[in-house]
Image (cartoon, rainbow, N blue to C red):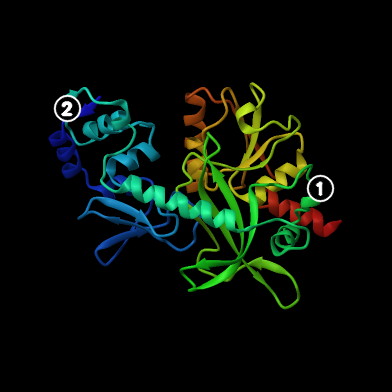
């Protein structure tokens, strides 16, 4: 089914995008735009903009782009085009939109010209970047960076194929290239849809840490719904053949997920890139989630976001359990670093 174009136009005219976005993302004015931290990837310096005059949002960090309908599809329970339109229509007081028969493919995303081509280009760039990088080897900068975080990759049953090392990865904010840890973000079919970058710096003493840049962690492409698959667990089976009812160990970042894989090697472990992506991840049929929770203060934005994601997953029938690091550590990886330092 599809909607009368005039009805869709009326929804867009009556929907102030910044008000819709501000319900989830704090925004501040910068010239003719409103700016905030992107909800689709981890960043410290805001690169997410909303332009009411043109009716779109855009993230210069991860490439997320869309309008009111795509925002509703990605951030509310309205997961498909029809539900998103109905949600927005009710929000702005419109009812009785005329639907006409149309091919099902037309209802999968907001019909904004060029968005599909732009997404395809981003994915192609993300895939090319990852494939051009090097598989991890002991002693390379990524290996040493993870070792500094208390993560010994040699202890894992198999080296994560979803991680690679890029000697020269361009960072637009600093205007130069850095060594980088790359993570392949794949969707439910196994297609690479984004590449997550952690920019690194090799220091004079041989240590490797995060690069001193505005946003040391950024994603190229849209990672919504995808995961970085880091460990297969005891079954050793690929994602598409995961055992029925398997509980997948999931964490927000690569470092936490690898830490979890060291603690519980029998578990399949993935990183979801950002907390806002947790409820969007496409899981194998019947799978549940064991979420490695960070110690965010009760009532904080992150704590509320996690509560919403867990409620949404459980409402869809996905079992969710929470595993928290000891209260004296910010997260699982900080605790792992303390263990490594004490050994």
Residue 29 rendering spot, x and y as whole percentages: 29, 62
Residue 263 rendering spot, x and y as whole percentages: 77, 42
* Spatial separation of the CA atoms under disc 1 and disc 2: 58 Å
> Which picture quadrant has residue 291?
top right
140 above or below 161? below
Tally of marks:
2
Extreme residue toward the left, this view: 6
Report helix, strand or loop for mark 1. helix
In this rendered view, identify the residue nearer to me: 219 or 136. 136
Asked if residue 327 shows in the view, the reply is no
* Residue 14 falls left or right of residue 204: left
Q: Residue 97 carries which label?
A: 2
In this rendered view, identify the residue nearer to me: 166 or 205. 166
Q: Residue 155 carries which label?
A: 1
Nearer-N-terminus badge (1/2): 2
Extreme residue toward the bottom, this view: 204
Q: Residue at x 15, y 25 (%)?
A: 98
> Which picture quadrant has residue 20?
top left
């Amino acid at each position: 089914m599809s909607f009368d174009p005039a009805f869709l136009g009326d929804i867009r005219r009556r929907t102030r995008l910044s008000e819709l976005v501000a319900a989830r993302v704090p925004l501040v004015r910068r010239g003719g735009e409103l700016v905030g931290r992107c909800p689709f990837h981890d960043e410290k310096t805001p690169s997410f903009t909303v332009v009411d005059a043109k009716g779109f949002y855009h993230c210069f960090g991860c490439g997320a782009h869309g309008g009111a309908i795509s925002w509703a599809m990605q951030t509310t329970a309205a997961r498909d085009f029809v539900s998103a339109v109905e949600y927005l229509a009710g929000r702005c007081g419109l009812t009785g939109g005329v639907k006409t028969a149309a091919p099902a493919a037309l209802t999968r995303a907001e019909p904004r010209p060029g968005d599909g081509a732009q997404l395809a280009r981003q994915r192609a760039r993300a895939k090319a970047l990852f494939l051009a990088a090097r598989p991890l080897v002991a002693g390379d900068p990524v290996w040493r960076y993870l070792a500094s975080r208390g993560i010994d990759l040699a202890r894992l049953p198999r080296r994560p194929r979803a991680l690679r090392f890029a000697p020269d990865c361009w960072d637009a904010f600093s205007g130069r290239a850095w060594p980088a840890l790359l993570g392949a973000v794949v969707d439910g079919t196994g297609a690479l849809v984004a590449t997550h970058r952690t920019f690194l710096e090799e220091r004079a003493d041989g240590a490797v840490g995060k690069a001193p840049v505005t946003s040391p962690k950024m994603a190229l492409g849209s990672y919504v719904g995808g995961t970085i698959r880091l460990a297969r667990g005891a079954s050793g089976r690929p994602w598409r053949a995961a055992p029925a009812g398997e509980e997948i160990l999931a964490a927000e970042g690569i470092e936490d997920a690898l830490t979890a894989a060291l603690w519980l090697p029998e578990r399949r472990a993935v990183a979801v890139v950002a907390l806002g992506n947790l409820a969007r991840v496409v899981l194998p049929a019947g799978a549940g989630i064991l979420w490695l929770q960070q110690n965010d203060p009760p009532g904080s934005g992150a704590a509320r976001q996690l509560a919403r994601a867990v409620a949404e997953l459980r409402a869809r029938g996905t079992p969710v359990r929470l595993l928290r690091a000891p209260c004296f550590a910010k997260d699982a990886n900080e605790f792992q670093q303390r263990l490594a330092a004490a050994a």
